[in-house]
Amino acid sequence: MSNKLSHFNNDGKIKMVDVSDKEATSRTAIASGKVLLNQETIFAITDQSNPKGNPLEIARIAGIMGAKKTSELIPLCHQINLSKVNVHAEIKEFGVYLQAVAKTTAQTGVEMEALTAVSVAALTIYDMCKAVQKDIQIMDIQLESKMGGSSNYKRS
């Protein structure tokens, strides 16, 4: 692994990485995260009594929209065409588990799009549930795997 920072030029100035010589390949990234909720909030979601409605479906759509805006939010991310983004939101004993899958055929990866999808979905759960619970925690947003490009990765 190179120690050279890819987003700096020889003069130490910030730059966007040039991917024009890279081959466009099929790439997939999966990210996940957790939103910790208390039992009262979990019940409000499952009982459909949450004051702002069903946060899981709103969070799924928000995550998909967030993935599509990644290059506008993260300054040096490349704008890529996404061929698929899916966000899964599931109630668990701790609250909500989120997983996002992002796919593209491009010259650079989709890790940031998957991570952004999970992050925006988690923030949406927070927003939708804050009327019921004030101490919500967003945790463990992480890349689970990536395939395609010059290297693959799978969290062990």
Image (cartoon, rainbow, N blue to C red):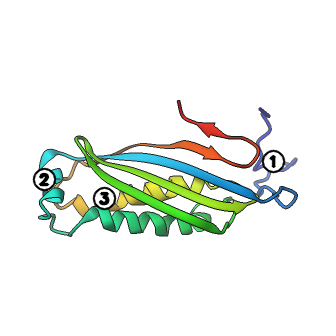
Amino acid on which disc 1 is placed? Gly
Nearest the viewer among 75 and 23 is: 23
Residue position for label 1: 12
Number of residue marks? 3
| Viewer-side label of 3, 1 | 3
Residue 43 on image: x %, y %:
13, 53
Residue 125 numbered tag: 3
N-term mark: 2 or 1:
1
Q: Quadrant of residue 106?
A: bottom right
Label 1 crowd bin: few (<14), some (14–19), many (20+), radius 10 Å: few
Secondary structure found at label 3:
helix
Residue 148 on image: x %, y %:
70, 49
Quarter occupied by the N terminus: top right
Q: Is residue 75 visible?
A: no
Q: Give the residue displayed 76% in from the left and 42% down from the top.
A: 5
Residue position for label 2: 43
Q: How far apart are the two marked residues, 2 and 3, measured between alpha carbons?
A: 14 Å
Q: Is residue 120 left or right of residue 56?
A: right
Secondary structure found at label 1:
loop
Label 3 crowd bin: few (<14), some (14–19), many (20+), radius 10 Å: many
